[in-house]
């Protein structure tokens, strides 16, 4: 007997049923593949995270920077031999070296075997014994000058203009007024001079905030020292004497780096507004050309910061600044001491490039009250004219002779010249 339900089904229906299991498996496989590729790539490796990429990029940057640093140090190595002059690029990439690092190249076991700048500028009367203490002829004048290279250049020009003037000069690289004043006071043999001239360089007035030439001359440090002057409650000068005061003592203590050197650093920390440990202290940074460049930029910021409260490029010197008040007392004391020694005192204000008449403006009323000979170079050699200066910032020879001629005429009109 044949049942109705057992009747044969159409071929199309059977084919559809047969295909269903394989289609379902394909869908499952497709879903599984999609779920797998959502976390892993086709090769089964995890995709890199953003932090991993950043670390890898940083390591590559560090590698290339290190390679560039090594190449610069190799190509533009600063010569270790004192008598070998570095190229301009050697100097450029070495400017950011620490002050101690630069000085260590100049210092040897003795003063004589060290760079000549190590012996320059020290207030050491023993080293002045070879200087003239009397005029070369009975009818000549002995002129003693105190200051920096500007004052020396002008005084030498004066000596060339007038053969009857014998020169005795004491100074230091970019010497500030406290150095010049202290040198005059310490120069016993200079009391025989008929004329005493003290030069005040405009840019060096800021160095009154120090007791050493190292921190202010960052790119070309000169290690000589000088007193730091303060005013007491009575308005009189009080000197803070540096614990290192001669070239031989400096060479010895710098090489030893003992307690005396540490006391000297403590003095600079307290009395030198341009002193900065990052700029001064020798460290591993000195070995990297790129880090030296960064430190050079920081040193420029320190130097700009050191002007605060004393000098502004727009308004000039602050008449109420402690340094200006101290400078006025120094000049008064210099004039009084010179007159007590029967000397003719002369105050020479030297305006270097970019400073105009700023120093003259702040000091001229005081100089008039002193009733002494004074001369400001801005009246003869305008500092805003680049033609008056050579590449290193000093006056051209013609400018030196122009100022010297004015000094010669001033001296000729005095009783000292007549005598």
Image: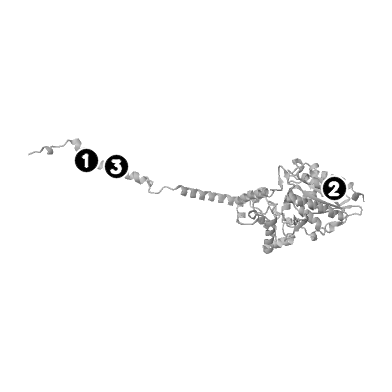
Classed neighbour count for the residue bearing mark 3: other residues with Cα under 10 Å, few (<14), some (14–19), many (≥20)? few
Q: Position of residue 407 (x, y in %)?
A: 85, 46
Element assignment for label 3:
helix
Q: Nearer the viewer, mark 2 or mark 1?
A: 2
Indicate which disc, 1 or 3, sits on the residue closer to the N terminus.
Answer: 1
Numbered label attached to residue 332: none
Element assignment for label 1:
helix
Element assignment for label 2:
strand
Numbered label attached to residue 27: 3
CA–CA distance in space, label 2 to label 1: 123 Å
Which residue position is annotated with label 2? 373
Find out whether the residues at labels 1 and 3 contact each other: C-beta distance under 8 Å: no
Classed neighbour count for the residue bearing mark 1: other residues with Cα under 10 Å, few (<14), some (14–19), many (≥20)? few
Residue for point 79% across, 52% down: 329
Q: Is residue 400 visible?
A: no
- Image quadrant holding the N terminus, namely top left
Find out whether the residues at labels 2 and 3 contact each other: C-beta distance under 8 Å: no
Find out whether the residues at labels 2 and 1 contact each other: C-beta distance under 8 Å: no
| Residue with the most extreme left position | 1
CA–CA distance in space, label 2 to label 3: 108 Å
């Amino acid at each position: 007997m044949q049942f109705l339900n057992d009747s044969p089904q159409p071929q199309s229906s059977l084919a559809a049923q047969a295909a269903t299991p394989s289609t379902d498996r394909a869908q499952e496989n497709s879903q599984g593949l999609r779920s797998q590729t959502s976390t892993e790539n086709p090769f089964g490796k995890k995709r890199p995270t953003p932090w991993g990429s950043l670390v890898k990029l940083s390591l590559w940057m560090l590698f290339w920077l290190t390679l560039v640093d090594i190449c610069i140090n190799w190509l533009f190595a600063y010569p270790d031999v004192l008598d070998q002059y570095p190229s301009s690029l050697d100097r450029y990439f070495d400017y950011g070296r620490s002050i101690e690092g630069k000085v260590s190249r100049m210092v040897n076991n003795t003063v004589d075997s060290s760079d000549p700048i190590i012996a320059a500028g020290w207030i050491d009367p023993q080293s002045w014994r070879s200087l003239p203490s009397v005029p070369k002829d009975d009818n000549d004048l002995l002129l003693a000058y105190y200051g920096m290279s500007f004052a020396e250049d002008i005084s030498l020009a004066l000596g060339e203009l007038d053969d009857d003037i014998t020169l005795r000069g004491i100074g230091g690289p970019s010497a500030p007024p406290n150095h010049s004043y202290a040198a005059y006071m310490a120069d016993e043999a200079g009391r025989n001079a008929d004329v005493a001239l003290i030069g005040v360089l405009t840019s060096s007035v800021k160095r009154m905030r120090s007791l050493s030439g190292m921190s202010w001359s960052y790119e070309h440090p000169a290690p000589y020292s000088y007193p730091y002057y303060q005013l007491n409650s009575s308005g009189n000068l009080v000197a803070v004497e540096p614990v290192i005061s001669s070239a031989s003592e400096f060479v010895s203590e710098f090489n030893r780096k003992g307690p005396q050197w540490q006391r000297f650093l403590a003095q600079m920390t307290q009395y030198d507004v341009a002193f900065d440990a990052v700029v001064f202290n020798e460290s591993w940074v000195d070995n990297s050309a790129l880090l030296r460049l960064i430190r050079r930029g920081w040193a420029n910021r320190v130097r700009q910061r050191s002007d605060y409260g004393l000098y502004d490029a727009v308004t000039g010197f602050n008449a109420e600044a402690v340094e200006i008040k101290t400078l006025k007392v120094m000049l008064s004391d210099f004039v009084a001491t010179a007159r007590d020694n029967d000397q003719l005192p002369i105050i020479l204000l030297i305006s270097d490039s970019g400073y105009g008449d700023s120093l003259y403006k702040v000091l001229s009323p005081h100089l008039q009250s002193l009733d002494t000979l004074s001369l400001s170079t801005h009246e003869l050699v305008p500092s805003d004219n680049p033609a008056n200066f050579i590449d290193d910032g000093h006056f051209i020879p013609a400018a030196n002779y122009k100022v010297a001629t004015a000094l010669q005429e001033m001296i000729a009109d005095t009783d000292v010249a007549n005598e």
